[in-house]
Amino acid sequence: MRVLRRTLGTFGTFLGVLGVLSGSVSCTAAHGDDARPGDDPPAALAPFERLLPAPASARADGPGYAVGPGTVIHTGPGPDEDVRQVGELLAEQLRGPSGLPLPVVDGPGGDGIRLRIDEEAEGVGDEGYRLESGPGGITLTARTPAGLFHAGQTLRQLLPVAGPGTVPGGTVTDRPRFAYRGAMVDIARHFFTVEQVKRYVDQLAQYKVNTLHVHLTDDQGWRLAVDSWPRLAEYGGGSEVGGGPGGYWTKDEYRELVAYAGRRYVDVVPEIDMPGHVNAALASYAELNCDGKVRERYTGIKVGFSSLCVGKERTYEFIDQVLGELAELTPGRYLHLGGDEAHSTPAADYAAFMDRAQAVVGRYGKTVVAWHQLATAQPAAGAVLQYWGHDRTPAAEKAAVVAAAKAGHPLILSPADRLYLDMKYGLATKPGQVWAGLVPVKRAYSWNPGAYLAGVPESAVLGVEAALWTETIATRGDWELMAFPRVLGLAELGWSPAASHDWASYSRRLGAQGPRLQAQDISYYRAPDVPWQ
Ligand code: TNX
């Protein structure tokens, strides 16, 4: 791996990557911690040891609780609609695999699985929880319903993949390292339905990922209906990479996704990318173009060729109406403005445009998120920057981001050579790109977000996000192949304490997730250096 990293630092080209691969064979063989085909099957881990993401603390102690036909889920002591909903959802999630009835009952109850809010619970923060298991049952305690939801996801992992089972006795006390643990999906390059994205939300939420960033618009398609500009979706949504039919989400579908994610304590962050990446809009409305001439729809995979017309007042009416409708649909605090790769917008125009766009977001009561290129302009007070650089990003570009972080702009880290899920694992990976290098499972996990950018302290890092760009990804199978298992590494980096960071331990726990992923029909990549169970 060390050779891989060094070589990528020297050559960014495809040829460089080829060179790395031939070198990596001997490099892998030299490492003792890589399991290879033919090794003995890995020993099973005890339930508390296989939790992923690793909890802040877990202690096995004494006899456990057998979840069986008589088990009841108690959502008490008092009536609380949110706790009730967490209990209902947990029951749904446990019934399938266990085959048990698991009725949900209001009130404190007796034996069984008990969900309790305790606003004074210690060591759990806003999103964490305590899970205590003994012969009389399992008690999940948290300050918030979100914490109870996360406790329930831990409980799922303590039970067998199929059939009833016994949760060992003991206590888990847990809380996240970072507040923002995100995954981005690009439904613009290839269109994907709300149903597919909901499936991803379920897959992610079980690993305590709490944010879904949706890249809704790009050169190849506009994917959300906007009442004041209907041709955006109706015409601009009718294309995608490769010439397929594309598609778009109605407002009701978008609302449904937001509600579905919300029930799983996942916030939706919608992105309307601007001032670049806008060909679909320029193809839908002639008036958005500086020359007043409508553009052709685009189905290729180039970036950086389109720009909104910065000098035209109509452009600002457009973004005001689009962002206004989006803000109304979005209960979360963030609107993502994109702002990346605006290669066709002169720097001064870019800065002037982003000033006005950020003001619009503020006026609708939301907080701006933008790709880190915003650091080259003037990020608004409180704006969050999403860093997508990599080992070969020029020092000056990094320095602008570091300066913005020091000036108080929280960072979301999405290093392209770690967390871009569209990068190939190896050259044999069919879908995917290689511009940021190959990203094997180990590389996606083996870095420290708290000390990633020199000069940026951990306290300036809001969190991490894995991005699934879809230029080369057109099917659910390819989506899952690229996301799994690397997105579990993202979940672990975002949640688990820095002290637990260790590939040997992580890869064993990842291997133990294999049967769970399989049971959920997730077509994941069986990376050769993971000891899959
Ligand atoms: C860079 S990341 C992009 C996207 C591409 C992606 C492909 C970013 C902010 N821009 O437009 O889809 O690379 O890997």
Image: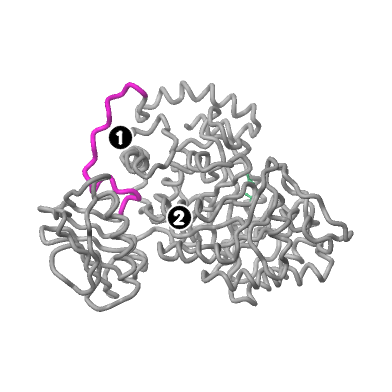
Tag 1: amino acid: Gln
For image coordinates 41% across by 22% down, the residue present is 29
Q: Which mark is residue 533?
A: 1
Query: Which quadrant, please, contains the C terminus?
Result: top left
Q: Is residue 39 magenta?
A: yes
| Some atom of ligand 1 lies within 8 Å of the CB belonging to the residue at label 2 | no
Residue 288, by quadrant, is bottom right
Residue bearing mark 2 = 201
Secondary element under disc 1, as helix, strand or loop, is: loop
Query: Left or right: where does residue 86 sit relative to residue 388?
Result: left
Q: Is residue 203 magenta?
A: no
Residue 405, by quadrant, is bottom right
Camera-side residue of 211 and 263? 263
Query: Left or right: where does residue 281 sit relative to residue 479?
Result: right
Secondary element under disc 2, as helix, strand or loop, is: helix
- Relative to 467, does residue 41 appear above or below in the rendering? above
Q: Is most of the magenta stretch helix, strand or loop? A: loop
